Image: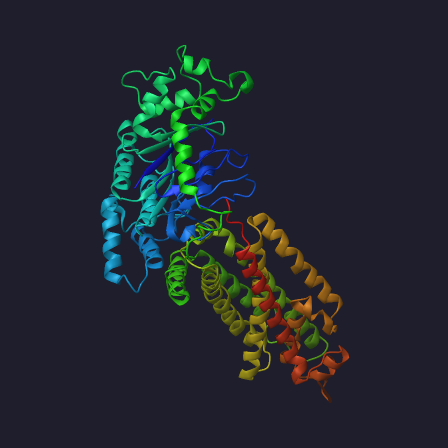
């Protein structure tokens, strides 16, 4: 196994990945590769390589594709974790989804989690929540170690890390690197100014400057290489700091014939002389020969394709694990659910008091019922604007976990939908309907109440599904609020102008919902000697009050819900996962 650190610097840019026994990927300099993290992302399959002129990423002599994420692990620089879960729960989530339950029992997984916690020194905070903006959690160093543990816990064959020691104290950083060094894995990582004890662990070193390769080879031979070029490391100077000074031009070289006699010096103008020197060195020639040997036999980049990788856990198993985490997250972060419930109770009482026991005398009987129904529908639609945050809040977490092969997109979508609909939409609507319906004095029949609740639920779900579609399509709350408010206002205005237009079913959420009139009308008494059935008013409005005339509106609402949900899922799959 090899550890391949890439020393980062403000002027270092990615240009070429040298050959390793298990990893080979020559990528010539490109505007896409503007930093070492970009280089690491390209190797790990996290950055779109479109635009690169040529290059190959090989593992065991076979070309890799997007399935690399299922056989490797990647620790991002920004720690992306579920804040409401503890350190142990986050590690269990990773191990449950990424180890085959047919080969690893629950006890085996628990033991592996305990081992990682001990190795990373997380015993004291194992049961402490990671923390959110509202919840105090673990320290930055403990978050970093937890992020590393979530990837290391699966014992991946190939591990990528983007500055794994950032945010850690010197002793903890040294402990982490020693742990990685003992893991026996192929490890590729970038690192910022490591101390000497860390640098001494490096097997292979790659240095780049301004998009060109400066050095690639054994880390132990790097000092002698630059010494031959006329650069001398002062006694007690950290080699990693020395290399950064050299590449940044802050270390002067002595008059060295190797640099002064470069064939390309007259033509390179202000280009990188260090890169030119390396390309004419015997070290570079050995690297080229090794690359030629590794890529030998790959015709057109097709012959070396390996077997397609797949998720190690089934769809239903992932649903249980991911859905369980969603429920736990909702229980530990119940602000949205409480607010939604309180809002519905408040408006139910408000509507019930304003339209308390609506009389049966004309004309107030008709006017009050029409006003109440319109207010109910508008409340159902606009009362669910909080749904636009569903896929925006955890967008970074979803992209990271899905790109790392934790779970399928469909699993996340369904788990998120069910975890939001039941506590935040269905339960509040049932309570709202029970309060408002009987306070308003509508039809006392229980079947009428059930149909009333069903109609409100479908109207609410139609609005929620549209909010889900917007949430999956944009990445900012500001844009989501604009996009969701426009169609809602348009539907409301349009409905006030087309009360009897059946064709508006496909364009308006409130128009089908206004068929609550079917449920609210009794027999009215305009005078003591005359009674007027409510159906007469429906006929004057051109509303079909037959059985199909009632249910066709529910079918229309169900169609709106289905279309918006399908489009939301498609948009979630289309989210750009490239960095």
Above or below for 388 versus 504: above
Question: Within the image, what quadrant is residue 176 found in?
Answer: top left
Position of the N terminus, as image quadrant, is top left
Q: For residue 404, say whether it is visible.
A: no
Question: Viewer-proximal residue, 488 or 116?
Answer: 116
Q: Residue at x 57, y 51 (%)?
A: 474
Up the image or down, 68 lies above or below 163; here it is below
Q: Residue at x 59, y 74 (%)?
A: 455
Compared across the picture, whether 153 is left or right of 301 comes to left
**For this rendering, which residue is in front, 506 or 240?**
240
Rendered image quadrant of residue 496? bottom right
x 54%, y 79%: residue:
450
Tell me if I can see residue 470 in this picture: yes
Work out which residue is located at the far top of the displayed protein and give it. Answer: 255
**In the picture provided, is 462 more to the left or to the right than 3?**
right
Q: Position of residue 279 (x, y in %)?
A: 45, 26
Q: Residue pushed farthest front?
A: 297
Q: Residue 375, position in %: x, y?
A: 63, 66
């Amino acid at each position: 196994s090899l550890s391949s650190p890439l020393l980062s610097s403000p002027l270092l840019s990615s240009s070429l990945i040298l050959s390793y026994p298990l990893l080979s990927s020559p990528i010539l300099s490109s505007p896409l590769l503007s930093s070492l993290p970009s280089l690491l992302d390209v190797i790990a399959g996290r950055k779109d390589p479109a635009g690169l002129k040529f290059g190959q990423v090989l593992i065991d002599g076979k070309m890799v594709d997007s399935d690399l994420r299922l056989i490797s692990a990647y620790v991002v620089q920004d720690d992306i974790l579920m804040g409401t879960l503890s350190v142990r729960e986050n590690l269990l989530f990773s191990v449950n989804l990424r180890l085959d339950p047919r080969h690893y029992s629950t006890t085996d997984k628990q033991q592996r989690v305990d081992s990682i916690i001990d190795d990373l020194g997380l015993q004291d905070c194992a049961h402490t929540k990671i923390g959110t903006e509202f919840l105090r959690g673990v320290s930055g160093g403990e978050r970093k170690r937890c992020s590393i543990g979530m990837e290391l816990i699966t014992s991946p064959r190939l591990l990528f890390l983007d500055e794994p020691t950032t945010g850690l104290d010197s002793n903890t950083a040294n402990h982490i690197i020693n742990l990685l060094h003992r893991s026996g894995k192929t490890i590729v990582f970038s690192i910022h100014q490591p101390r000497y004890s860390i640098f001494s662990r490096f097997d292979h070193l790659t240095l780049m400057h301004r998009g060109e390769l400066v050095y690639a080879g054994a880390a132990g031979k790097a000092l002698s290489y630059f010494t031959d070029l006329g650069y001398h490391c002062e006694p007690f100077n950290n080699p990693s700091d020395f290399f950064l000074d050299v590449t940044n031009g802050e270390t002067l070289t002595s008059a060295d014939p190797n640099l002064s006699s470069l064939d390309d010096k007259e033509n390179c103008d202000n280009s990188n002389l260090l890169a030119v020197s390396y390309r004419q060195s015997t070290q570079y020639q050995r690297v080229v020969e090794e690359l030629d040997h590794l890529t030998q036999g790959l015709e057109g980049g097709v012959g070396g394709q390996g077997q397609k990788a797949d998720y190690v856990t089934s769809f239903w198993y992932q649903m249980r694990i991911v859905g369980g985490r969603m429920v736990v997250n909702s229980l530990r972060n119940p602000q949205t659910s409480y607010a939604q419930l309180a809002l519905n109770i408040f408006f139910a009482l408000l509507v019930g008091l304003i339209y308390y026991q609506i009389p049966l005398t004309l004309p107030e009987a008709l006017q009050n019922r029409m006003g109440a129904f319109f207010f109910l529908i508008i409340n159902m639609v606009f009362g669910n604007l909080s749904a636009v945050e569903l896929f925006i809040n955890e967008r970074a977490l979803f992209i990271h976990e899905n790109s790392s092969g934790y779970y399928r997109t469909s699993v996340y979508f369904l788990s998120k939908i069910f975890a939001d609909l039941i506590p935040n939409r269905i339960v509040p609507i049932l309570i709202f309907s029970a309060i408002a319906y009987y306070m308003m004095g509508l039809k006392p029949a229980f079947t009428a109440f059930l149909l009333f609740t069903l109609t409100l639920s479908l109207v609410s779900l139609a609005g929620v599904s549209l909010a889900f579609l917007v949430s999956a399509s944009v990445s900012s709350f500001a844009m989501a609020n604009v996009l969701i408010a426009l169609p809602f206002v348009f539907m409301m205005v349009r409905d006030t102008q087309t009360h009897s237009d059946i064709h508006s079913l496909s364009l308006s959420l409130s128009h089908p919902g206004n068929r609550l009139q079917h449920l609210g009308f009794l027999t009215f008494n305009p005078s003591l000697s005359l009674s007027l059935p409510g159906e007469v008013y429906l006929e004057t409005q051109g509303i079909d009050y037959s059985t199909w005339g009632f249910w066709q509106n529910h079918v229309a609402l169900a169609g709106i819900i289905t279309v918006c949900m399908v489009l939301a899922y498609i948009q979630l799959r289309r989210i750009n996962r490239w960095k």
